[in-house]
Amino acid sequence: QVQLVESGGGLVQPGGSLRLSCAASGSINSIDAMGWYRQVPGKERELVATFTRGGSTNYADSAKGRFTISRDNAKNTVYLQLNSLQPEDTAVYYCSAVDRLDVSRRYWGKGTLVTVSS
């Protein structure tokens, strides 16, 4: 089994920054393509940024130029640096990973809430 635990969410003013962390534990070698999604109540969960299975990165258009995904393999942790935050970035941010042997199987963390408000 795989556990993904997010941290780093909170309340921030427009224009501010946050860094989210996702620590993976358990069967680490069974997962790939870790990344971040977000969801607003009443809307579908959407991609924010992710590593691809080939190791490159993929960003939603709304994230390009403002958000940066990175990872520390030694710590089994993926980060999401959020800069120039706007109220429309308010959402629950979820960490995700794909099963290496069954790409249709996706693991999710419980999420961390980011609220952008003055």
Image (tube, rainbow, N blue to C red):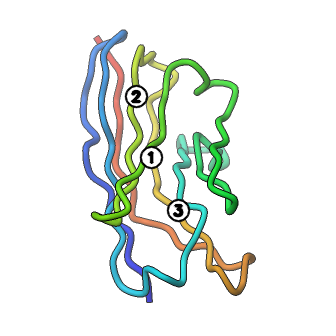
In screen coordinates, is 101 left or right of 85? right
Question: How many numbered markers are drawn?
Answer: 3
Residue identifier under label 1: 93
Residue at 58% in and 69% down: 32
Category of crowding for the residue at label 3, using alpha-carbon neighbours closer than 10 angstroms: few (below 14), some (14–19), many (at least 20): many
Q: Is residue 68 left or right of residue 3?
A: right
- Give the Cα separation between the discs numbered 1 and 2: 11 Å
Residue behind mark 3: 96
Q: Rounded to the nearest whole Å, what is the CA distance between mark 1 and mark 3? A: 10 Å
Seen from the viewer's position, the closer of residues 94 and 59 is: 59
Q: Position of residue 22 (x, y in %)?
A: 35, 57
The nearer-to-camera label among 1 and 3 is: 3
In this rendered view, identify the residue nearer to me: 15 or 74. 74
Upstream in the sequence, badge 2 or badge 3? 2
- Work out whether 95 lies above or below 8: below
Task: Name the residue nearer the viewer: 88 or 69.
Answer: 69
Image x and y of residue 39, in percent: 55, 45
User: Whole-percent x and y of residue 109?
Assistant: 42, 65
Name the residue beneath numbered marker 2. 82
Q: Position of residue 100 (x, y in %)?
A: 65, 80
Q: Secondary structure at mark 1?
A: strand
Quadrant of res 46: top right
Point out the image quarter for the C terminus.
top left
- Contact between marks 1 and 2 (CB within 8 A): the answer is no
The amino acid sitting under disc 3 is Ser
- What kind of element bears circle 2? strand
Residue at (35% x, 36% y) in the render:
114
